[in-house]
Image (cartoon, helix red, strand yellow):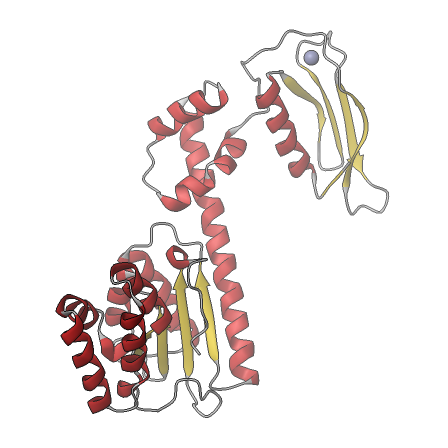
Amino acid sequence: MRFVNPEQLKHMLCNYVVANGYQLCYKKNDSRRLLVKCCSGACKFRLWASRTSEEKAFQIKSLINEHNCARNFKLGSIVNYAWIGTHYTTQFLQKQKVSVRLLRDEVKEKFRIDISMGQCRRAKKYAIELIEVTLVDHYAKLWSYDEEIRRSNPGSTVKINVNAMPDENKANWKWFLENLKDDLHLEDGFSISLMSDQHKGLLEAVKEVLTIAKHRQCARHIVANFRKRFSGVHYETMFWKASKASTEPLFNAAMKEIQVLNHVAYDYLVETNPKSWSRAFFQEGNMCDAGKMDYLRALIVSSGMQGKSQSSPC
Ligand SMILES: [Zn+2]
């Protein structure tokens, strides 16, 4: 069995220890070799792993997977804060404010392990560091991807899926947009036309950070939410009529039809800021006419919308 590095194998060993309740100890533990035995000493279990000859992988060379020791849920030293932290990154990603005490209770309940508050604090720190590395890495990829697109094809749409945002609140969106603004030299958003889903924090952050960006919302996201509240094919047809209207009078006529049908639906659409989703208000004409426009379009889709209606702008 091969692993990318000793850390990957050690992580698997922690899983094994926690799942089975054995106390394993490292007898040799460096970047080239790993010898693992049961801490009790008299037990048969023995795992020997080392780097492969071509140095690219770490491999289990021999394994005696038999125990004659008693199972023990005091798990020795190999289950450490890094293992715990790795298991909780998703939770911290969604909610950074999980308390250390709550983490300890959860670990105890889920894995039957008693860990100290100190280990919990280190596990939390480790999980948050992992998230930050992921975010920075994710952001670096966005940056190089965008540079390449802009270099090779000015005027194209850059689609940005933000799926590693801990707590998608306004402060985090501001942080994200400020980085985007600095790296891409967007100034106040003069050369940017931004499309996004309807995440409230994102809408507010755009207003503050990219004050003069043309902010558009994807009509398909709007209609997906509209459909949830007002069912019936009429609503959708009329919505598209308003969205695709090429002039303001045509837009007003379409909205009037919706108002006559149901004034609550009309009020709902007015609340969504039609100027951001109706073509009647897009000065440069057809949204899909890419290539002619020499500005960046960024389509920002937050994780909240992932998998629901992740459509392209056109
Ligand atoms: Zn054993």
Q: Is residue 200 visible?
A: yes
Identify the residue at horizontal 47%, vertical 62% (top origin): 139
Camera-side residue: 275 or 79? 275
Identify the residue at horizontal 71%, vertical 37% (top origin): 31
Residue 94 x/y as whole percent: 38, 45
Identify the residue at horizontal 78%, vertical 31% (top origin): 49
Q: Quadrant of the C terminus?
A: bottom left
**Where 178 falls versus 64 (above or below)?**
below
Q: Quadrant of the N terminus?
A: top right
- Number of labels in the image equals 0
Give left or right: position of 197 versus 6.
left
Residue 70 x/y as whole percent: 64, 6
Residue 98 x/y as whole percent: 34, 36
Identify the residue at horizontal 41%, vertical 40% (top origin): 91
Camera-side residue: 287 or 253? 253
Instruction: State which quadrant residue 180 falls in.
Output: bottom left
Q: Is residue 218 visible?
A: no
Camera-side residue: 40 or 1? 1
Ligand 1 position by quadrant? top right
Give left or right: position of 7 versus 292.
right
